Amino acid sequence: MAMHPDPTRISRPALFLVLFYLLATSAQAQEQAYFPDPNPAIQQRIAEWQDLKFGVLFHWGPYSQWGIVESWSLCPEDLSWATGARKAPFAGDYNEYRKTYEALQYSFNPRQFNPTHWAEAARKAGMRYVVITTKHHDGFCMWDTKFTDYRITDPKTPFSTDPRSNVIREVFDAFRKEGLWTGAYFSKPDWHSDYYWWKKFPPADRNANYSIAKYPEQWAKFVEYTHNQIDELMSDYGKVDILWLDGGWVRKKTSEEVQQELSEWYEGSRWARNAQSQDIDMEGLVRKARAKQPQLIVVDRAVPGPHQNYLTPEQHIPENGLPYPWETCMTMATSWSHVPNDVYKSKAEILRKLVDIVSKGGNYLLNIGPRPDGELDSTAYQRLEEIGAWMDVHGKSIYNTRPYQVWHEGEHIRFTQSKDGKRVYVFFLETPPAADVVIESLSLRPGDTLSMLENGQAIKWKTGEKGVSLRLPAAFMQSAHPVRVLELKRAG
């Protein structure tokens, strides 16, 4: 991903800068213009995606063998969170490090890969769609592409002899069987491809390492390569619901934008020393992809325009939501990719984030990093089971809902409502200090009913000058669920 490591894994000197970056990009997402897709069928499909609410994301590749941040240790920029992730013994010699990193292909053999287990666990957790890295920035392909030998099905990769070696096919088939939508994460930059990081020149940063204006034929090869790979994914892997494109710096830019980028600085060096328009003909790419997948949602991350069908704030929940379709992508542990002995968020934290996001009108894409052997950590499965136990009881307050007239009251109360407005759901993220609660944002009328969602027990209520006064029963106050929900049914 154009993802950045969790701050808990970053050295102190870089911590402030990374936090500043995350806050800055979050602010940009808050203010960014949204360009609705002009196709009514795609608009309808996005609305259907908004009903799903909860998805799972997998970051997986040969880098999982080292337990390091995915791809970014290859980036030659002077960024502490990239260079600090490099694995010994070649951490100080970039060229040797890159060779050693790319040689991980020769030992990648995830014999415990079990996509059926993944899919069953995700479905039972209440997840409704999956996104998986088909290719990260390092360029390693997790499907049987015909356009590079840097892939999991190449004879140089030990797992290539396994009948499950075409990982993306296996994952998509398993998740479709469980009724989930499928999404293909695809990195637009490719740091292995000679068409992007041309061996004629050393790479200087995350961008193409040559002048596209001077060598247009080399860039044309990269554009063709990119289109060919996406065409494979759209043609040979069944129905694909989401094309989730990462690496927003690969985009068409005006000359004014290029000059602006050249003037910007980051951590003491230029953020884009090779600033130039990196046009991969998104319009043509999307047109060809939808010729194969007519209902395809396209997410050209961080590139304002009609091909960014929804926005994806990263490791961040917008303070007041966003006024257009959006999805928070966030790690279940601290890292996007697998790290041994990583620390996982508690079920309570995950559920509270889910409710917070949905109350603001967003979707929650929760990331898990599979191990190098192809399985998930037992803690990840435990969390999925725990989340599923809550969703089995409270799912109707999450799926197919939209924001209420206000998304919250105070710090610990959230709201959603059914699309027809006949049901309102009140979430308590913490146990109230007392059983008598006043909610100013609710308006109840004679004939309306209020009850606990988990058991249907009626809640006594009365209206007053300050709002609706509730008397919460002992079953509510003593509930084992970390988030409790009331259901308001409108009369008539």
Image: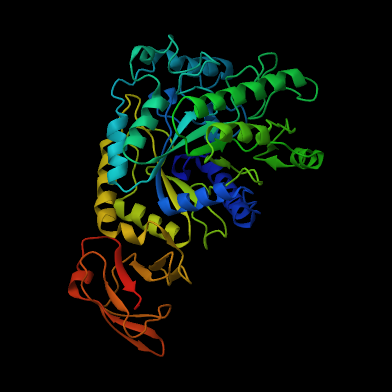
Labels in figure, total? 0
Q: Residue at x 52, y 63 (%)?
A: 320
Q: Is residue 130 left or right of residue 470?
A: right
- Tell me if I can see residue 53 in this picture: no
Task: Name the quadrant containing residue 441.
Answer: bottom left
Q: Is residue 423 above or below residue 103?
A: below
Residue 33 location in percent, x, y? 66, 54
Snapshot quadrant of residue 488: bottom left
The C terminus is located in which quarter? bottom left
Residue 71 pos. (x, y %): 51, 28
Of residues 273 and 424, the one nearer the viewer is: 424
Does 200 appear above or below 113? above
Q: Position of residue 122 (x, y in %)?
A: 32, 42
Residue found farthest to the top: 155
Q: Residue at x 34, y 20 (%)?
A: 164
Residue at horizontal 59 percent and vertical 35 percent from the top: 247
Identified at 64% across, 43% down, the residue is 303
| Closer-to-camera residue (182/293) | 293
Give the percent coordinates (x, y) of residue 467: 40, 84
**Corner quadrant of residue 427:** bottom left
Closer to us: 447 or 68:
447
For residue 173, say whether it is visible: yes
